[in-house]
Amino acid sequence: QVQLVESGGGLVQAGGSLRLSCAASGRTVNSRDIGWFRQAPGKEREFVARINWISGTTYRDSVKGRFTISRDNAKNTFYLQMNSLKPEDTAVYYCTAGNGDNWTYWGQGTQVTVSS
């Protein structure tokens, strides 16, 4: 089993930055695809970014050039660096790990609020 714990969320003004972290425990996620999703109030959960062993990094169009996903295998941790934040980025952000489109493990979520 893998447990994922997010941290780094908070309140930031538009244009600001946050870095989300996702610490994995139980088993390593180094050989798995890792990703970030988000869910805004009243909306469905949506894909944000992923690292796939075959296709590399992928981002949803609205965050390209502003968000960066990365991983530190030595720490069994992965990150989402978010720059130039916009109010529409406000959501609960979830980290996940799995293979392909089969996202097996999920964190509990961390709130990101961007004020205008």
Image (tube, grey):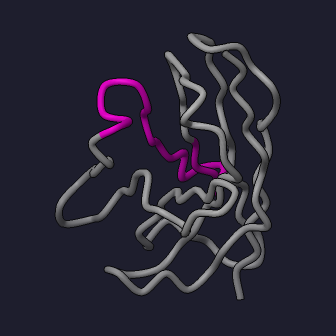
Query: For residue 18, what is the image quadrant?
Result: top right
Q: What residue span does the magenta drawing correspond to? A: 62-79
The extreme left residue here reads 55
Q: Nearer the viewer, residue 42 or 20?
A: 42
Pinpoint residue 95: horizontal percent, then vertical percent: 61, 61
Q: Reply yes or no: does residue 63 show up in magenta.
A: yes
Quadrant containing the C terminus is top right
Residue 12 position (above or below residue 103): above
Q: How many marks?
A: 0
Residue 84 position (above or below residue 57): above
Q: Nearer the viewer, residue 67 or 61?
A: 61
Pinpoint residue 82: horizontal percent, then vertical percent: 54, 28
Query: For residue 81, what is the image quadrant?
Result: top right
Q: Reply yes or no: does residue 20 show up in magenta.
A: no
Pinpoint residue 87: horizontal percent, then vertical percent: 60, 28
Query: For residue 51, what is the image quadrant?
Result: bottom left
Q: Is residue 28 left or right of residue 50?
A: right
Q: Nearer the viewer, residue 90 or 50?
A: 90
Q: Is residue 17 left or right of residue 51?
A: right
Q: Nearer the viewer, residue 14 or 68?
A: 14
Residue at 70%, 13% in the rendered image: 13
Residue at 77%, 36% in the rendered image: 8
Residue at 31%, 47% in the rendered image: 59
Quadrant containing the N terminus is bottom right
Q: Is residue 54 left or right of residue 86?
A: left
Pinpoint residue 25: horizontal percent, then vertical percent: 76, 69
